Image (cartoon, helix red, strand yellow):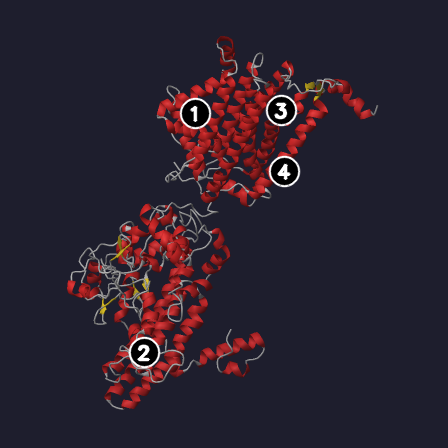
Amino acid sequence: MATPVRWIQERLPVSGEDLRELTNEPVPNHLKRWWFALGGTPAYLFVVQIVTGLLLAVYYKPAAETAYESVRFITEEAAYGWLVRGVHKWGATFMIAAVILHQMRVYFTGAYRKPREINWMVGMCMLICTLMLGFTGYCLVYEQLSYWGAAVGANIAGSVPVVGEWMKMAMLGGDGFNSQTLPRFFVLHAAVLPTLLTLLVIVHIGIIRVQGVTEFEFGDEPEDEPKYFNFFPEHILSELIIGLLLMVVLTALACIVPATLGPKADPLVTPEVIKPEWFFYVAFRWLKLFTGTVAVLSTGFIVFIMFVWPFIDDWIRRKTKYPEASVWIGIVGVLLIILLTVWEAVVAH
Amino acid sequence: MTLKEKRTILIVLSGLFLASLVFVQKLEVARRYEEAGLSPHSVAIPASSRQCVDCHIQGTPGIVDHWRGSTHALKGVGCVDCHRADEADADAFPHYGYTVATIVTPRDCAVCHGEVAKEFEKSHHAAGGNILASLDNFLAETVEGAREPFNPHSPTPGKAVDMVNGMASAFSGCQQCHGSKIALLGTDGGMITVDELQPDENGRPTNLDALAKVVKDESGRPRFHAGTWPNTGIGRLNLDGSRGSCSACHSRHDFSPRRARQPENCGKCHLGPDHPQKEIFEESKHGIAYRDLKDEMGLDGDSWVLGKDYSHAPTCATCHMSGNIRNGGKITHDPGERISWTNRPPVSLVMDTDINGKIVKATDPAERQKLIADTAEAKRTRMKAVCSNCHTPDYVNAFYKQYDDLVILYNEKFAKPGKAIMAALQDQGLLTPTQFDEEIEWTWFYLWHHEGRRARHGASMMAPDYTHWHGMFEVAERFYMEMIPQARELADHDGGTAGAEVHRVIDEILARPEHRWFEEGAAEQMAAIRKAMEERYGQGGPAAKKGGEGP
């Protein structure tokens, strides 16, 4: 054995065998299907966001006086700044889309059922974390739309009964958008939420390792083939291919449809059309359908239902004659999300 | 439900979700591009103008295209909103269910832009049409053309010309900048203008007899006198009694603020031998910086405040009209608000103005004090607020000292003496009452109207070549080499007391210290120059004996 390897092993007593055992977790054959690799995709995109986010943070200056100019500098002057910003922007869109697709897969395959209820709820926390990352990141640009998007977001938070005003204060660092707001959003976006999401990813994967991957049989599996294959390198290679493909698509999008920069935020001029980022269209349209507190409470109620869905589903399956009700509810839910999102996208107000 | 069935559901829903995502992203990207000014804004055509657009997109697509790119279109202001007319208006006519007028006047624009219209009304721009009673107009109508049409004196092969319009130079020249007196064609072939229509305070004609004489086509549309319309002169005299044309600067039909902010826009009129402000700007450091940096100046921005949105370079609009951080971003549509000298007349005047914006010419200090509503100093302070975005107070004050000195030098050395000589010739009856029929009248006109203005404008906007070679040098040459000899020739020709009086005036002027060199010579100064030339180049040379070869 070469001396440097021995030197390391004397200090870190981990053998190659141990590493192989750690990574060679056998995973069920259904994971060979591409659509079962969607859980790894958001994780991969999260890494892309961290790397591009760190690069952006080198130049970004989180203050009302400097934020817009620093984003303009990144976009127009810093070497490859436009590319990094473009990948970061499209990466966010892809990450949220991948999370939604992963959640749909978990939902429709019933992979949240006992004993995986906790991991579903961890996943829900990750979804909220990801959406919050998107919201805070959007606000940091400090262009007209992002500024007013933040103002509207804060007002929505403010309309939550009892704790609303406190939430709004905590969010903005005052009654309205002020000099404390952008640094606050920046700390949330670049430190608190990524750390939280990293911890949740660890817990999420940890639970999967403890419980094992849900096993599915489609009925067309060959009898004479093993039911499991190695996580490393086979499944990791699949994930890597998806990752590289995503990188190509992200880079292409960043080049073809680069991140733009609207006019600088002007607190005195309300834009004619205020819209959040696309992933909040559904909630935005929903809120417009109802008035004030009803809208906010109903949104909160839906999120709560999503959180505890494994238990509701369990109750439905045990107590009713409709064991597959979750599938039909899911279909209605997804169609509703698509409808509300497209609706908000096509109308001006 | 089998796993395979669930898989099918999942594939369909995921497909739908991804398709909706692509669709939403497409809209989102389009919106972002629009917001960033990278694509034209989407325009919703107002219902009232839908019919106009549908028809004019075929007939005059350029108008519709321009309008589509305008802020008006973005804000839902359509054709009818501006062209709408009252049936009682002199130029109103029915047009596909609407009563409209062809010409949109400042009175129409004032419906939405009231404050702007008020500022404009006070401005010298709005009085541009006063040229109709000026020397310039006499030049165009009589000297260059003829007030009455006349017969051609030989055929024009290929064109049937039976009459020469002697007003052509005035119509196509002067009035396209200064503004025409808009006229409707009368049944007797005459012109029906604001003078005949006598509009009331709402712009409606009160002289119905004149109105009845207006020639109309079969659809009821009144016919304009071809010499007075089309016209976008800035001081246009409109049928409704209003003065001016907003589209002089805010070209129809896109009314682009970007264009109005660029010096080329002002250059339609502010150029040429008599007031080359555009060329002067181009020669100045300001113009040089503008040419280099115009792409970074945010000319398209909704807000265009000096010191906030840009500081790269000024344009005409920056100094004379636009907002800056020192004045709270206040825009003015009276460019005279920041001008402290008028360099337009033969002798420059201090821009102390009365309540109507007219220059106070009274000489008695107490009377001046009584009449002045806005002092030249206040105007200069407003201009200094612009300058101070980039220059220190000492720098700005020193510049103004240089500028004042040049204007006063021109006034005292050439303008006032020139005026005195012309007055002496006039008073002594050595000139006919008609202008421009004697050489000295052309000489004097060139001196103040062309060269004198160039010198003063050059100094006002930091263009050294225009101040000196195109300005004071030519003023001096014109004064000493043409005006004085021509005046003396007229005096000699008279040979009597009148001529003697003119000689006396000239002698008195030339005896002044600043003119003494001309008749007494400047031997001492020439010797000093010759000595310096010899030291610098090793020889004085034959040219040096006559004053050197110049720099």
Pinpoint residue A228: horizontal percent, then vertical percent. 70, 18
Whether callout 4 and callout 3 share a subunit is answered yes
Q: Nearer the viewer, residue B193 or B395?
A: B193
For marks 3 and 1, the one nearer the N-term is 3
Query: Is the residue A192 above or below the residue A59 in the image?
Result: above
Labelled pair 4, 3 in contact (Cβ < 8 Å): no
Mark closer to the observer (1, 2): 2
Given the image, what chain letter belongs to the residue carrying mark 2? B
Image mark for residue A170 = 1
Q: Residues within 10 Å of mark 3 (few under 14, many from 20)?
A: some
Pinpoint residue B277: horizontal percent, then vertical percent. 40, 65
Residue that badge 4 annotates: A248
Residue that badge 3 annotates: A36
- What secondary structure is marked by label 1? helix
Q: CA distance from mark 2 to mark 3?
A: 88 Å
Mark closer to the observer (4, 1): 4
Query: Is the residue B265 above or below the residue B12 in the image?
Result: below
**Mark 2 belongs to which amino acid?**
Val
Residue that badge 2 annotates: B164
For marks 4 and 3, the one nearer the N-term is 3
Q: CA distance from mark 4 to mark 3?
A: 21 Å
Q: CA distance from mark 4 to mark 2?
A: 73 Å
**Mark 3 belongs to which amino acid?**
Phe
Q: CA distance from mark 1 to mark 2?
A: 81 Å
Q: Locate residue A22 relative to residue A65 in the image: left or right.
A: right
Q: Residues within 10 Å of mark 1 (few under 14, many from 20)?
A: some
